[in-house]
């Protein structure tokens, strides 16, 4: 129970971190209404960003997320990878391919983690591999978020930055899937496959 409480707290902290920027922009723009002509557009842009982030977190955490097409997955990840500096490319996967309900959240969290491996931006490539999937970071600089390899080694990790990795591993275990960095030495891909 203690681990669940810690994860809930870490997830709440991560959600607040993701929402505070757009909310602050909305508030600042509303304060400038009547003084700055661009304030309404700024507020609308920030509200759209907030809406996008909330839709992602709702889908990733599984609230009402059923089967999801690759095009829907790509849309949910727009602006969410590496602070908007990276984008998802589905390699040789038709946009209309439907991902099963337990798989979609795994790929959403997996893509976010691979995006975090691209601090200067780039591309997160998603490809089918056997019955599973591989997500590969492609960019000028690659550095896996520290929580992911630590958790895969069985180490205890906490904190808001670790929440996506913790959720990915818990959802994968619940769905009977496994998560791995491959190859283990100098990993260049995140693999998500059945057989947890």
Image (cartoon, grey):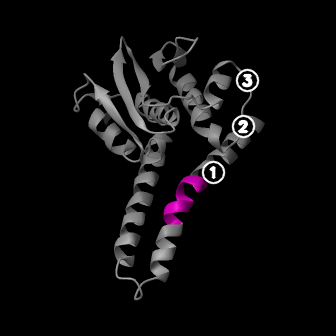
Q: Is residue 191 above or below residue 29?
A: above
Looking at the picture, how far across and down is residue 176, in whole percent?
52, 19
The residue shown at (36%, 26%) is 126
Marks 2 and 3: CB-CB under 8 Å? no
Query: Viewed as shown, does residue 16 lie left or right of 9?
Result: left
Q: Residues within 10 Å of mark 3 (few under 14, many from 20)?
A: few
Q: Which residues are magenta?
A: 16-23
Query: Viewed as shown, does residue 142 lie left or right of 104?
Result: right
Residue 12 disc label: 1
Name the element at disc 3.
loop
Decide which of 189, 165 is in the foreground and name it: 189
Q: Which residue is mark 3?
A: 155
Looking at the picture, how far across and down is residue 196, in whole percent?
54, 15
* Residue 151 appears in the rendering: yes
Q: Is residue 21 magenta?
A: yes
The residue shown at (55%, 31%) is 168
Which quarter of the image is occupied by the N terminus?
A: top right
N-terminal label among 3 and 1:
1
- Pick out the residue farthest to the bottom: 34
The residue shown at (48%, 19%) is 188
What type of secondary structure mainly makes up the magenta span?
A: helix
Looking at the picture, how far across and down is residue 5, in whole percent?
72, 43
Q: CA distance from mark 1 to mark 2?
A: 13 Å
Looking at the picture, how far across and down is residue 26, in whole percent?
47, 71
- Pick out the residue farthest to the front: 140
Query: Viewed as shown, does residue 135 lie left or right of 145?
Result: left
Marks 1 and 2: CB-CB under 8 Å? no
Q: Is residue 22 magenta?
A: yes
Q: Which residue is mark 2?
A: 158
Residue 174, located in which quarter of the rendered image? top right
Name the element at disc 1.
helix
Q: CA distance from mark 2 to mark 3?
A: 10 Å
């Amino acid at each position: 129970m203690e681990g669940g409480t810690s994860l809930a707290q870490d997830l709440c902290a991560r959600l607040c971190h993701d929402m505070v920027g757009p909310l602050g922009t909305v508030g600042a723009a509303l304060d400038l209404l009547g003084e700055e002509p661009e304030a309404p557009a700024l507020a609308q842009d920030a509200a759209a960003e907030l809406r996008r982030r909330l839709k992602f977190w709702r889908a990733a955490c599984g609230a009402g997320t059923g089967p999801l097409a690759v095009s829907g997955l790509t849309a949910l990840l727009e602006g969410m990878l590496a602070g908007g500096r990276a984008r998802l490319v589905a390699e040789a996967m038709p946009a209309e391919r439907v991902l099963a309900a337990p798989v979609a959240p795994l790929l959403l969290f997996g893509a976010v983690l691979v995006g975090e491996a691209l601090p200067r931006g780039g591309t997160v490539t998603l490809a089918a591999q056997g019955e599973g999937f591989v997500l590969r970071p492609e960019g000028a600089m690659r550095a896996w978020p520290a929580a992911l390899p630590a958790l895969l080694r069985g180490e205890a990790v906490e904190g808001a930055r670790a929440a996506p990795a913790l959720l990915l591993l818990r959802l994968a275990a619940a769905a009977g899937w496994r998560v791995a960095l491959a190859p283990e030495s100098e990993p260049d891909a995140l693999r998500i496959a059945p057989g947890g």
